[in-house]
Protein backbone atom coordinates (compact mmCIF):
# COMPACT_ATOMS: atom_id res chain seq x y z
CA UNK A 1 0.00 0.00 0.00
CA UNK A 2 0.96 3.66 -0.33
CA UNK A 3 1.87 5.35 2.93
CA UNK A 4 3.79 8.31 4.28
CA UNK A 5 6.89 7.30 6.21
CA UNK A 6 9.15 9.37 8.43
CA UNK A 7 12.29 8.27 10.18
CA UNK A 8 13.41 11.59 11.68
CA UNK A 9 11.95 14.71 13.24
CA UNK A 10 12.32 17.85 11.14
CA UNK A 11 10.97 19.91 8.28
CA UNK A 12 8.28 18.54 5.90
CA UNK A 13 11.07 16.93 3.82
CA UNK A 14 11.32 14.13 6.42
CA UNK A 15 7.99 12.85 5.07
CA UNK A 16 8.28 10.39 2.19
CA UNK A 17 5.63 8.64 0.12
CA UNK A 18 6.52 4.94 0.03
CA UNK A 19 5.16 1.54 -0.80
CA UNK A 20 4.91 -0.54 2.39
CA UNK A 21 3.22 -3.74 3.55
CA UNK A 22 -0.49 -3.50 4.20
CA UNK A 23 -1.16 -3.91 7.96
CA UNK A 24 -2.98 -7.03 9.15
CA UNK A 25 -5.65 -6.71 11.82
CA UNK A 26 -5.49 -8.88 14.93
CA UNK A 27 -8.60 -10.57 16.30
CA UNK A 28 -9.76 -7.42 18.13
CA UNK A 29 -9.14 -5.05 15.22
CA UNK A 30 -10.67 -3.99 11.93
CA UNK A 31 -8.76 -3.03 8.79
CA UNK A 32 -9.88 0.25 7.26
CA UNK A 33 -9.33 1.47 3.72
CA UNK A 34 -8.66 5.14 4.36
CA UNK A 35 -10.53 7.58 2.12
CA UNK A 36 -9.51 10.76 3.92
CA UNK A 37 -6.99 11.71 6.59
CA UNK A 38 -5.77 15.06 7.92
CA UNK A 39 -2.72 17.16 8.59
CA UNK A 40 -3.27 19.02 11.85
CA UNK A 41 -1.21 21.45 13.88
CA UNK A 42 -0.63 18.50 16.22
CA UNK A 43 0.89 16.45 13.37
CA UNK A 44 3.16 19.35 12.41
CA UNK A 45 4.25 20.06 15.96
CA UNK A 46 5.15 16.42 16.38
CA UNK A 47 6.99 16.25 13.04
CA UNK A 48 9.11 19.30 13.87
CA UNK A 49 9.13 18.91 17.67
CA UNK A 50 8.02 22.56 17.81
CA UNK A 51 6.04 21.92 20.97
CA UNK A 52 5.18 24.35 23.79
CA UNK A 53 8.03 25.25 26.14
CA UNK A 54 9.09 22.41 28.42
CA UNK A 55 7.17 19.75 26.48
CA UNK A 56 9.88 18.48 24.16
CA UNK A 57 11.25 15.79 26.46
CA UNK A 58 7.79 14.41 27.25
CA UNK A 59 6.97 14.38 23.53
CA UNK A 60 10.18 12.50 22.74
CA UNK A 61 9.45 10.03 25.57
CA UNK A 62 6.03 9.24 24.14
CA UNK A 63 6.80 9.28 20.41
CA UNK A 64 10.47 8.35 20.24
CA UNK A 65 13.57 9.79 21.89
CA UNK A 66 15.83 10.34 18.88
CA UNK A 67 13.44 9.53 16.03
CA UNK A 68 9.75 8.71 15.66
CA UNK A 69 8.83 5.27 16.96
CA UNK A 70 5.68 4.95 14.82
CA UNK A 71 6.85 5.03 11.22
CA UNK A 72 3.61 6.24 9.62
CA UNK A 73 2.33 9.64 10.84
CA UNK A 74 -1.26 10.88 11.03
CA UNK A 75 -3.94 10.41 13.69
CA UNK A 76 -7.31 10.89 12.03
CA UNK A 77 -9.03 8.87 9.34
CA UNK A 78 -12.34 8.30 7.64
CA UNK A 79 -12.81 5.23 5.46
CA UNK A 80 -14.37 1.84 4.93
CA UNK A 81 -13.96 -1.40 6.88
CA UNK A 82 -12.43 -4.09 4.64
CA UNK A 83 -11.56 -6.83 7.19
CA UNK A 84 -12.91 -7.68 10.64
CA UNK A 85 -11.07 -9.57 13.40
CA UNK A 86 -12.70 -12.72 14.76
CA UNK A 87 -13.55 -11.16 18.14
CA UNK A 88 -14.92 -7.89 16.83
CA UNK A 89 -18.55 -7.03 17.45
CA UNK A 90 -20.32 -3.99 16.12
CA UNK A 91 -18.45 -3.53 12.83
CA UNK A 92 -18.72 -5.36 9.51
CA UNK A 93 -17.03 -5.22 6.13
CA UNK A 94 -18.34 -2.25 4.15
CA UNK A 95 -19.09 -0.05 7.19
CA UNK A 96 -18.14 3.60 6.77
CA UNK A 97 -16.23 4.68 9.88
CA UNK A 98 -14.16 7.58 11.19
CA UNK A 99 -11.93 7.99 14.19
CA UNK A 100 -8.55 8.59 15.74
CA UNK A 101 -5.59 6.26 16.11
CA UNK A 102 -4.32 8.55 18.89
CA UNK A 103 -0.69 8.13 19.84
CA UNK A 104 -0.32 5.02 17.66
CA UNK A 105 -0.48 7.31 14.59
CA UNK A 106 -0.51 5.48 11.21
CA UNK A 107 -3.45 7.26 9.54
CA UNK A 108 -1.53 8.86 6.63
CA UNK A 109 -1.75 5.63 4.64
CA UNK A 110 -4.08 3.69 2.35
CA UNK A 111 -4.95 1.24 5.14
CA UNK A 112 -4.93 1.42 8.92
CA UNK A 113 -5.83 -1.09 11.66
CA UNK A 114 -7.99 0.02 14.58
CA UNK A 115 -9.03 -1.80 17.73
CA UNK A 116 -12.81 -1.93 17.55
CA UNK A 117 -13.24 -0.64 21.11
CA UNK A 118 -11.11 2.47 20.51
CA UNK A 119 -12.10 5.91 19.23
CA UNK A 120 -13.92 4.92 16.03
CA UNK A 121 -17.62 5.04 15.13
CA UNK A 122 -19.77 4.53 12.03
CA UNK A 123 -20.71 7.49 9.85
CA UNK A 124 -23.92 7.97 7.85
CA UNK A 125 -23.92 7.65 4.03
CA UNK A 126 -24.87 11.31 3.78
CA UNK A 127 -21.59 12.49 5.31
CA UNK A 128 -18.51 12.65 3.08
CA UNK A 129 -15.24 11.19 4.35
CA UNK A 130 -13.64 14.64 3.96
CA UNK A 131 -16.25 16.26 6.19
CA UNK A 132 -16.12 13.41 8.71
CA UNK A 133 -12.36 13.53 9.16
CA UNK A 134 -12.47 17.32 9.52
CA UNK A 135 -14.71 17.02 12.57
CA UNK A 136 -12.17 15.28 14.70
CA UNK A 137 -9.27 17.57 15.67
CA UNK A 138 -11.04 20.83 16.35
CA UNK A 139 -14.38 19.27 17.20
CA UNK A 140 -13.10 16.93 19.90
CA UNK A 141 -10.89 19.65 21.38
CA UNK A 142 -13.63 22.27 21.52
CA UNK A 143 -16.14 19.80 22.95
CA UNK A 144 -13.73 18.56 25.59
CA UNK A 145 -12.80 22.01 26.88
CA UNK A 146 -16.11 23.87 26.49
CA UNK A 147 -18.54 21.10 27.43
CA UNK A 148 -16.56 18.74 29.64
CA UNK A 149 -14.08 21.06 31.40
CA UNK A 150 -15.89 24.40 31.82
CA UNK A 151 -19.51 23.23 31.46
CA UNK A 152 -20.44 26.14 29.24
CA UNK A 153 -23.92 27.49 29.93
CA UNK A 154 -26.70 29.20 28.02
CA UNK A 155 -26.28 32.97 28.08
CA UNK A 156 -22.57 32.96 28.91
CA UNK A 157 -20.27 35.22 26.91
CA UNK A 158 -17.35 33.39 25.35
CA UNK A 159 -14.26 34.95 23.82
CA UNK A 160 -12.46 32.72 21.31
CA UNK A 161 -8.97 33.77 20.26
CA UNK A 162 -8.11 32.21 16.89
CA UNK A 163 -11.68 31.82 15.66
CA UNK A 164 -10.68 30.83 12.12
CA UNK A 165 -8.48 27.84 13.02
CA UNK A 166 -9.49 24.22 13.38
CA UNK A 167 -10.21 24.50 17.10
CA UNK A 168 -11.61 28.03 16.92
CA UNK A 169 -14.04 27.30 14.08
CA UNK A 170 -15.34 24.29 15.99
CA UNK A 171 -15.45 26.16 19.30
CA UNK A 172 -17.61 28.95 17.87
CA UNK A 173 -20.19 26.41 16.71
CA UNK A 174 -20.16 24.38 19.94
CA UNK A 175 -20.46 27.51 22.07
CA UNK A 176 -23.43 28.62 19.97
CA UNK A 177 -24.98 25.15 20.29
CA UNK A 178 -24.94 25.60 24.08
CA UNK A 179 -26.57 29.02 23.77
CA UNK A 180 -23.54 31.19 24.48
CA UNK A 181 -22.85 34.60 23.01
CA UNK A 182 -19.60 34.38 21.06
CA UNK A 183 -16.95 36.97 20.37
CA UNK A 184 -14.28 35.66 18.04
CA UNK A 185 -10.85 37.12 17.38
CA UNK A 186 -9.46 36.73 13.86
CA UNK A 187 -7.90 38.79 11.09
CA UNK A 188 -9.98 40.92 8.72
CA UNK A 189 -9.61 38.19 6.05
CA UNK A 190 -11.53 35.66 8.12
CA UNK A 191 -14.30 37.83 9.49
CA UNK A 192 -16.99 36.57 7.10
CA UNK A 193 -16.01 32.95 7.85
CA UNK A 194 -16.33 33.28 11.61
CA UNK A 195 -19.59 35.21 11.27
CA UNK A 196 -20.97 32.45 9.04
CA UNK A 197 -20.15 29.96 11.82
CA UNK A 198 -22.29 31.93 14.26
CA UNK A 199 -19.96 34.43 15.97
CA UNK A 200 -22.04 37.33 17.29
CA UNK A 201 -19.12 39.69 17.42
CA UNK A 202 -15.88 39.62 15.46
CA UNK A 203 -12.72 41.31 16.67
CA UNK A 204 -9.82 42.09 14.37
CA UNK A 205 -6.66 41.23 16.32
CA UNK A 206 -4.72 44.04 14.72
CA UNK A 207 -6.85 46.45 16.78
CA UNK A 208 -5.17 46.62 20.17
CA UNK A 209 -7.99 48.07 22.29
CA UNK A 210 -10.49 45.24 21.86
CA UNK A 211 -10.50 44.34 25.55
CA UNK A 212 -11.74 47.72 26.73
CA UNK A 213 -14.25 47.81 23.91
CA UNK A 214 -15.75 44.41 24.50
CA UNK A 215 -15.98 44.10 28.26
CA UNK A 216 -15.93 40.98 30.41
CA UNK A 217 -16.18 37.34 29.42
CA UNK A 218 -17.44 34.25 31.25
CA UNK A 219 -15.18 31.94 29.29
CA UNK A 220 -12.02 32.73 27.31
CA UNK A 221 -10.58 30.12 24.96
CA UNK A 222 -7.14 30.97 23.60
CA UNK A 223 -6.06 28.68 20.77
CA UNK A 224 -3.30 30.97 19.50
CA UNK A 225 -1.05 30.95 22.55
CA UNK A 226 -0.58 34.69 22.98
CA UNK A 227 -2.92 35.19 25.97
CA UNK A 228 -1.47 34.88 29.46
CA UNK A 229 -3.65 33.92 32.42
CA UNK A 230 -3.01 37.39 33.88
CA UNK A 231 -4.35 38.99 30.70
CA UNK A 232 -7.40 36.70 30.77
CA UNK A 233 -8.11 37.59 34.40
CA UNK A 234 -8.53 41.23 33.40
CA UNK A 235 -11.07 40.26 30.75
CA UNK A 236 -12.98 37.68 32.80
CA UNK A 237 -16.06 37.99 35.01
CA UNK A 238 -15.69 37.00 38.71
CA UNK A 239 -16.80 33.46 37.85
CA UNK A 240 -14.93 33.44 34.54
CA UNK A 241 -12.73 30.59 33.34
CA UNK A 242 -9.75 30.77 31.00
CA UNK A 243 -8.93 27.84 28.71
CA UNK A 244 -5.36 28.07 27.43
CA UNK A 245 -4.65 25.11 25.14
CA UNK A 246 -1.31 26.19 23.76
CA UNK A 247 0.87 26.74 26.83
CA UNK A 248 4.22 25.66 28.22
CA UNK A 249 4.89 23.52 31.26
CA UNK A 250 4.81 26.45 33.73
CA UNK A 251 1.22 27.47 32.94
CA UNK A 252 0.21 23.83 32.72
CA UNK A 253 1.48 23.17 36.26
CA UNK A 254 -0.18 26.35 37.52
CA UNK A 255 -3.54 25.13 36.17
CA UNK A 256 -3.41 22.16 38.57
CA UNK A 257 -3.76 24.60 41.50
CA UNK A 258 -5.85 27.33 39.83
CA UNK A 259 -9.51 26.47 39.37
CA UNK A 260 -10.20 29.21 36.84
CA UNK A 261 -7.30 28.22 34.60
CA UNK A 262 -7.91 25.21 32.37
CA UNK A 263 -5.10 23.67 30.36
CA UNK A 264 -4.09 20.12 29.44
CA UNK A 265 -4.75 17.80 26.56
CA UNK A 266 -8.18 17.06 25.12
CA UNK A 267 -9.31 13.47 25.44
CA UNK A 268 -10.89 11.53 22.59
CA UNK A 269 -13.92 9.30 23.17
CA UNK A 270 -16.46 7.40 21.11
CA UNK A 271 -19.19 9.39 22.88
CA UNK A 272 -17.69 12.67 21.70
CA UNK A 273 -17.45 11.38 18.11
CA UNK A 274 -21.13 10.39 18.23
CA UNK A 275 -21.98 13.78 19.69
CA UNK A 276 -20.22 15.62 16.85
CA UNK A 277 -21.98 13.43 14.28
CA UNK A 278 -25.32 14.30 15.84
CA UNK A 279 -24.50 18.02 15.62
CA UNK A 280 -23.55 17.67 11.94
CA UNK A 281 -26.65 15.67 11.09
CA UNK A 282 -28.91 18.25 12.70
CA UNK A 283 -27.17 21.11 10.92
CA UNK A 284 -25.68 22.54 14.12
CA UNK A 285 -22.06 22.02 13.07
CA UNK A 286 -20.35 22.46 9.71
CA UNK A 287 -16.73 21.31 9.46
CA UNK A 288 -14.54 23.93 7.80
CA UNK A 289 -12.20 22.59 5.11
CA UNK A 290 -9.59 24.96 3.73
CA UNK A 291 -7.63 22.75 1.31
CA UNK A 292 -7.64 19.13 0.13
CA UNK A 293 -4.35 17.54 -0.95
CA UNK A 294 -3.57 14.12 -2.43
CA UNK A 295 -1.34 11.82 -0.34
CA UNK A 296 1.53 12.78 -2.66
CA UNK A 297 1.09 16.40 -1.52
CA UNK A 298 1.75 15.69 2.15
CA UNK A 299 4.84 17.93 2.33
CA UNK A 300 2.91 20.86 0.83
CA UNK A 301 0.08 20.19 3.28
CA UNK A 302 2.51 20.27 6.22
CA UNK A 303 4.16 23.46 4.94
CA UNK A 304 0.78 25.14 4.67
CA UNK A 305 -0.22 24.11 8.21
CA UNK A 306 3.21 25.29 9.42
CA UNK A 307 2.42 28.73 7.97
CA UNK A 308 -0.18 29.25 10.72
CA UNK A 309 -2.60 30.75 8.18
CA UNK A 310 -4.94 27.85 7.47
CA UNK A 311 -8.65 28.22 7.96
CA UNK A 312 -10.27 25.26 9.70
CA UNK A 313 -8.89 21.94 8.49
CA UNK A 314 -6.55 20.41 5.92
CA UNK A 315 -7.64 17.11 4.39
CA UNK A 316 -5.58 14.47 2.60
CA UNK A 317 -7.80 12.60 0.17
CA UNK A 318 -6.90 9.06 -0.90
CA UNK A 319 -9.64 8.61 -3.48
CA UNK A 320 -8.51 7.91 -7.05
CA UNK A 321 -9.34 11.25 -8.65
CA UNK A 322 -6.60 13.37 -7.16
CA UNK A 323 -8.12 16.65 -5.99
CA UNK A 324 -6.61 20.03 -6.72
CA UNK A 325 -5.49 22.43 -4.01
CA UNK A 326 -8.06 25.24 -3.99
N1 LIG B 1 -4.37 21.12 24.38
C1 LIG B 1 -4.97 20.40 23.47
O1 LIG B 1 -5.52 19.34 23.76
C2 LIG B 1 -4.99 20.87 22.05
C3 LIG B 1 -5.78 20.19 21.12
C4 LIG B 1 -5.81 20.68 19.81
C5 LIG B 1 -5.06 21.79 19.47
N2 LIG B 1 -4.26 22.37 20.40
C6 LIG B 1 -3.45 23.55 20.04
O2 LIG B 1 -4.33 24.56 19.65
C7 LIG B 1 -3.66 25.42 18.76
C8 LIG B 1 -4.60 25.80 17.64
O3 LIG B 1 -4.81 24.72 16.77
P1 LIG B 1 -5.62 24.96 15.42
O4 LIG B 1 -5.57 23.71 14.65
O5 LIG B 1 -6.93 25.57 15.73
O6 LIG B 1 -4.70 26.07 14.75
P2 LIG B 1 -4.73 26.58 13.26
O7 LIG B 1 -5.95 26.04 12.56
O8 LIG B 1 -3.43 26.36 12.60
O9 LIG B 1 -4.86 28.16 13.44
C9 LIG B 1 -4.66 28.93 12.31
C10 LIG B 1 -5.54 30.14 12.41
O10 LIG B 1 -5.06 30.96 13.49
C11 LIG B 1 -5.31 32.30 13.13
N3 LIG B 1 -4.40 33.20 13.83
C12 LIG B 1 -3.06 33.28 13.69
N4 LIG B 1 -2.57 34.22 14.52
C13 LIG B 1 -3.63 34.74 15.18
C14 LIG B 1 -3.77 35.75 16.18
N5 LIG B 1 -2.72 36.43 16.66
N6 LIG B 1 -5.00 36.01 16.66
C15 LIG B 1 -6.08 35.35 16.20
N7 LIG B 1 -6.01 34.40 15.23
C16 LIG B 1 -4.80 34.09 14.75
C17 LIG B 1 -5.06 32.31 11.64
O11 LIG B 1 -5.84 33.33 11.06
P3 LIG B 1 -5.13 34.55 10.27
O12 LIG B 1 -4.44 33.91 9.08
O13 LIG B 1 -6.27 35.39 9.87
O14 LIG B 1 -4.19 35.17 11.23
C18 LIG B 1 -5.53 30.93 11.16
O15 LIG B 1 -6.84 30.93 10.62
C19 LIG B 1 -2.40 24.71 18.33
O16 LIG B 1 -1.30 25.30 18.96
C20 LIG B 1 -2.57 23.30 18.83
O17 LIG B 1 -1.36 22.69 19.17
C21 LIG B 1 -4.21 21.96 21.68
Image: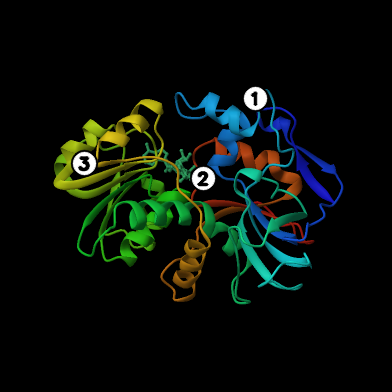
Residue linked to disc 3: 210
In the image, residue 56 lies at what x, y percent? 53, 25
Q: Is residue 242 above or below residue 145?
A: above
Q: Tell me the tag on residue 65.
A: 1
Q: Relative to residue 61, is residue 310 depicted above or below? A: below
Q: Which residue is mark 2?
A: 310
Query: Can residue 215 be seen at all in this image of the molecule?
Result: no
Residue occupying the point 62% across, 36% down: 303
SS state under label 3: helix
Q: Position of residue 140 (x, y in %)?
A: 47, 55
Assess whether mark 2 and mark 1 are in contact (beta carbons under 8 angstroms): no
- Residue at 45% across / 47% down in the picture? 266
As rendered, which of 188 and 219 lies closer to the eye?
Answer: 219
Q: Quadrant of residue 25?
A: bottom right
Residue at 66% from the left image edge and 54% from the top image edge? 37
How would you rate the neighbour count of disc 3 (Cα within 10 Å): few for under 14, some for 14-19, many for 20 or more? few
- Cβ at disc 2 under 8 Å from ligand 1: yes
Residue 95 left/right relative to 25: left
Q: Earlier in the sequence, mark 1 or mark 3?
A: 1
User: Quadrant of residue 45 in the image?
Assistant: top right
| Rendered view: 175 above or below 75 | below
In this rendering, the label closer to the viewer, 1 or 2: 1
- Provide the secondary structure element on which disc 1 rests: loop
Between the C-alphas of marks 2 and 3, the distance is 23 Å
Farthest residue to the left: give it: 238
- The reply to whether discs 2 and 3 touch (Cβ–Cβ < 8 Å) is no
Cα gap from disc 1 to disc 3, whole angstroms: 43 Å
Q: Disc 1 and disc 2: Cα gap in Å?
A: 30 Å
Amino acid sequence: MKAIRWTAYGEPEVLRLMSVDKPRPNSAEVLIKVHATTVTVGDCRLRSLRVPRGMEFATRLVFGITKPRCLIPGMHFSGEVTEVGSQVNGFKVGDRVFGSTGMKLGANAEYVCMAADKEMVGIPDTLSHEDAVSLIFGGLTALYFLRDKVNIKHGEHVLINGGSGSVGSAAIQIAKYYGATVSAICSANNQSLVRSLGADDVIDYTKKDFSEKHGKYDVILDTVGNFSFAHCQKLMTKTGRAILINVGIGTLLRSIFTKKLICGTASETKEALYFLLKLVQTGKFVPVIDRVYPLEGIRDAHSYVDSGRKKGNIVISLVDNIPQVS
